Amino acid sequence: MKELEEYRKFTKPAELHKAVNTLRGLVAGINSDTEIGSKEITELINWCELHTHLNDRHPFSELLPVVEAACADGVITEDESKDILWLCNNFADNSSYYNEVTSSIQFLSGMIHGIMADGDLGDKEISTLKSWVDANEFLAGTYPFDEINSLLHTVLADKKITTEEREELMAFFGNVIDFTSSYNLSEADFSNLREKYTVSGICAFCPDIEFEDRTFCFTGESYRAKRAEMATAVQSLGGIVKSAVTAKTNYLIVGNAGNPCWAYACYGRKIEEAVRLRKAGESVLIVNETDFWDAVDDNMAGISK
C-alpha cells in the first residue's frame, strides 16, 4: 500500500484529469434521458467512492463531502441527488494535462458508462449520444469514436430502433465501459451480447482517405476488382501496399463480396489486429471498399474533398 501511495505521487495529475473527464461524461450520460433513477445515482456515488484517494484535489475535494453527506443516512433523497448532479455539471477545471482528443475520448467513455448506468438503453439516450458524436467529428480516426459513429448511423438510418439494433449497440458499449468502477453493470451480461452480435470491429463512416505515402492493407474479397488491381490503384496514387496489418498501416480495406460491412467474424486475423491496434491508440482506419473506391475514383478524376 505504501508503494502504491508513493507511485501515485507521480501519476496523480494524469489520474486526476482522466477522472475529471470521465466524471463529466458519466454525469452527461446519466442526464441524457432527463430521467434520473436510483440505479443511476447509486452508480455515480459508487464511482465517486472509488476515487476517494483524489479527495485532496479539486473538484473531488468539493464533490466527495457532498456525496458522503448524502449517503450518511443510507437514503439518497431527490434533493440530494439533484445537488450531486448539479455540482458535477458545474465544477470548473482549468488544467490541460491531456490534449483535446484524449480528454474527449475519456469523456465519451464516461458518457457511455452513464448512459448504461441503469442497464437500459433508451431512444433519448441514443439520440443524445448521436448529437454528441455529430458535434465532435474532430475525433474521427480514433477508437472508439469511429465504431460508435458507424453503428449509430446504421441503427438510425431507417429512423426505427429495433431490439436487435439496441442490443448491438449495448454489445459494443461493453467494450468501452470500465466494469471495475461499476456497481450495477456486469461484464458477463455484456460479454453474452458481444458473443451474440460480434461487433468488435466497425468500418469508419465516410472516412477521409489520402493516398500519397499512406500504407494500405486489404482483407476479404471485392466484387469490383482482384487484390492485385486494388494494389495497383493505390500505388498509382502514391500509396504503399503491405500484406500484413501493423502500427504503420493507415488503412485496412474490407472487401464486400459475400459479406455485410461489419460481419467481422468471417474476416479473421487482420480485422482483429486492426482493432487491437486501434484500442492501443494507433491510427489504423478500417474502411469499407465502397468508400475506398469512391476515394480512388475521385483522385483519378482529379476531384479532391
Image: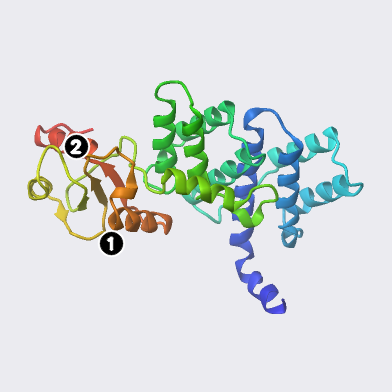
Q: How is the image coloured?
A: rainbow
Q: Is residue 168 left or right of residue 110?
A: left
Q: Which residue appears at 43% of the width and 43% of the height?
A: 197
Q: Is residue 237 left or right of residue 150?
A: left
Residue 295 shows which numbered tag? 2
Q: Earlier in the sequence, mark 1 or mark 2?
A: 1
- Residue 123 point in image, percent of width and height: 56, 26
- Mark 1 belongs to which amino acid? Thr
- 218 or 284, which lies in front? 218
- 51 or 36, which lies in front? 36
Question: Which quadrant of the view contains residue 33?
Answer: top right
- For mark 1, does the 10 Å Cα neighbourhood hold few (<14), some (14 to 19), or many (20 or more) residues? some
Q: Which residue appears at 31% of the width and 35% of the height?
A: 206
- 185 or 279, which lies in front? 185
Q: Give the position of the C terminus as an image quadrant.
A: top left
What residue sits right under mark 1 in the picture? 246
- Mark 2 belongs to which amino acid? Ala
- Residue 16 point in image, percent of width and height: 64, 57
Question: Which quadrant of the view contains residue 301?
Answer: top left
